[in-house]
Amino acid sequence: MTSVSDDGKRSKRFGRGGHTTGNVPLRMRFGVIIRSMWHQSVGRFALIVMACWIAVSLLSLFWTPYPLLYTDGGHAWAAPSAAHPLGTDGVGADVLSWLMAGSRTNLVIALLTMLVSAVIGLACTAVMISGRRALASAGVVVVDALIAIPTVLLALLFAVPFGTSISVIVAACGMTYGLNMARIVKPSASLAARSAYVEAARAMGGERVARVFSPISCPRLSPVLAVQLSMSAGTSILAEAGLTYLGVGVPSGVPSWGHTLTTSVRLISVYPLTVLWPGLTVTLVVTALYLLGDTIRDCADPLANVELRKLAAAVGRQTHNTGADA
Amino acid sequence: MRYLIRRLIWFAVALLGLSLLVFAALRILPGDVASVMAGTNATPARIAAIRSRMGLDRSYPQQYADWLGGLLHGNMGVSAISGRTVASQIGAHAAVTLPLIVLSLLVALGVGIPMGCQAVLAGSPRVRSVLHTIAIVGGAVPALWGGLLLIMLFGRGVGLIGILPSQGFPDAGWHAPRAALISLILPTITTGLVAGAGIMRYTRACLISMEDSDAVAMAMACGMTRRQAMLRVGLRLSAAQLVSVAGLTFAQMITGVMVVESLFNLPGLGAMLINDVGNRDLIAVQSELFLLAAFFLLLGLLVDLMHHALDPRLGEQTQHAGGEGSTHDLGIR
């Protein structure tokens, strides 16, 4: 680490990068990471699926083959045809339109779950590695105890007073995955907390916990965080499907993949193959999310990614020549 | 030992906190059980009578104390809708769900661990990568969809090879063990395979992390083949982590189990809970939610204790690192 900082502001300015990539602008690092992900077949698959997901979500805001509330009463339970590529459901609504519109709901759920689980997970980690031993060991034991509560029980508990809503799903998923994340991130975080540069930063003033999560040491945690967050996002989509089917997920009338899957369950005796599409969509996207985390971990690691090291070296030379380095 | 005591104390605290959370969440509930029970044309007097019979007219702390006292004596109250005691209701439904969960876990471990090992140890790289793909894609299949596909393949009446029943549980219950067991086959396979993919991924990650370990190198130096060393030494050393993962899988499997119960029309705990939540059956939901959550807390406790028993290193670590060792530093790969 080149720039051990003496105050918070400077560490923000220079400390964005990793151990060896400290002074490379984030934008350039991002470009290199995406490019090296693209060069792997797995990473390319994940990136393409993500791009399609986002594109369809955006498109569905402006255009779907049929308006969501349009129902074709004469053609309820219709088989796939040119007019309705995936058929229609029990009230004659177009399944494809609902599937497309569902992708934006699931995108929102996945993003919010990532956010909530990151906040809960990092807060728990911070407690577990804090300097006060009583607090830390209490944190460990509380996380160990609560981690066993299944998502669906939490969702049921929240759904009783608050009714069904997206926030119930996000709260239930965010809490379980957050605790999970805390448990998995904690070893890396406590290693980081003991590392020399955090000690140095601490000696110059400042809380240890704050230093661990400061931009200096985040590169240490970011690989495991990337994997965990992408798992959270993927699992939240699976949970949404399950909870919606059980009646404690998204409210009826809101399009989501779980909703389409649930509708298609009733369709099974009429046109069994229709069941394939929503399920395939979910499986595809969740697989891509799992793989995305893995490839980000591999590509964002300066030790494993040669391109990233080359970039760091190039930028280092440049800044050295112009004398702009800290 | 110190870990055990601390863990037990926190278990009790967590139980108490949980009971408060359940109690509080259910009191914010809009809707009144008494008026639901009394029916639509009830007089206010009748509603008031029901309220006082159920103890709903007392203050919240009083109600909480009553409920907790009842729980400690094993009295979980009487369902407002069905009129049966909550304990008997839970018992009847658990007779379906518990066998389903245990069988699924057996399938998950039986499929996940050998295939996870094979994903590391198989000779040809192609087999290894195919197995890895199966593990990832398998974990991405929603239980609902997996169950549907199995019904479409094997379900009697609808499936391509319609040989297995896909709806309901025999009325005679476990008095007709054969029929009961057969009706659980498809649900078990569904949850077992979905959870098995997760176990497979963890087994693979554990074994890969063991590949370069000194222990495995030592075993190979003593004359074992790589395969033997990995299976006898590497797997044994990963056992503690695998137990934790299996415990967590077990807890998360319950979502899948509830979905599958509903899909296959089994009268299990999930069906009961969803039904009672829908009916706003306050007394029943309160005890059921608490009991289920307590069950999972207990499970977590047992898993952690087992983890400690299986990994002697943790005992030493906790002595001087303050519970450092109770976490499972297993990145998902």
Image (cartoon, rainbow, N blue to C red):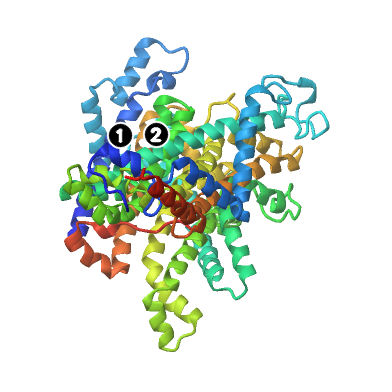
Q: Residue at x 71, y 48 (%)?
A: B152
Give the residue number, with chain letter if any, for mark 2.
A157
Identity of the residue furthest to the right in this view: A82
Crowd tier of the residue under label 2, counting other residues whose Cα lies within 10 Å: few below 14, some 14–19, many 20 or above: many
Rendered view: A98 above or below B250: above
- Marks 1 and 2 close (CB-CB < 8 Å): yes
Rendered view: A15 above or below A99: below
Residue B21, numbered label: 1
In x, y percent, where is residue B97?
Answer: 48, 49
Rendered view: B217 above or below B2: below
Subunit under mark 1:
B
The quadrant holding residue B75 is top left
Q: Residue at x 60, y 59 (%)?
A: B133
Amino acid type of the residue tagged 1 in the rendering? Leu
| Whether residue A165 is visible | yes
Q: Is disc 2 placed on a helix, strand or loop?
A: helix
Q: CA distance from mark 1 to mark 2?
A: 9 Å
Crowd tier of the residue under label 1, counting other residues whose Cα lies within 10 Å: few below 14, some 14–19, many 20 or above: some
Nearest the camera: A35 or B107?
A: A35
The quarter of the rendered structure image containing the N terminus of chain B is: bottom left
Q: Relative to residue A177, is residue B204 drawn left or right?
A: right
In x, y percent, where is residue A105?
Answer: 56, 30
Q: Relative to residue A261, is residue B299 drawn left or right?
A: left
Amino acid type of the residue tagged 2 in the rendering? Leu
Q: Are marks 1 and 2 on the same chain?
A: no
Rendered view: B197 above or below B63: below
In x, y percent, where is residue B167?
Answer: 63, 46
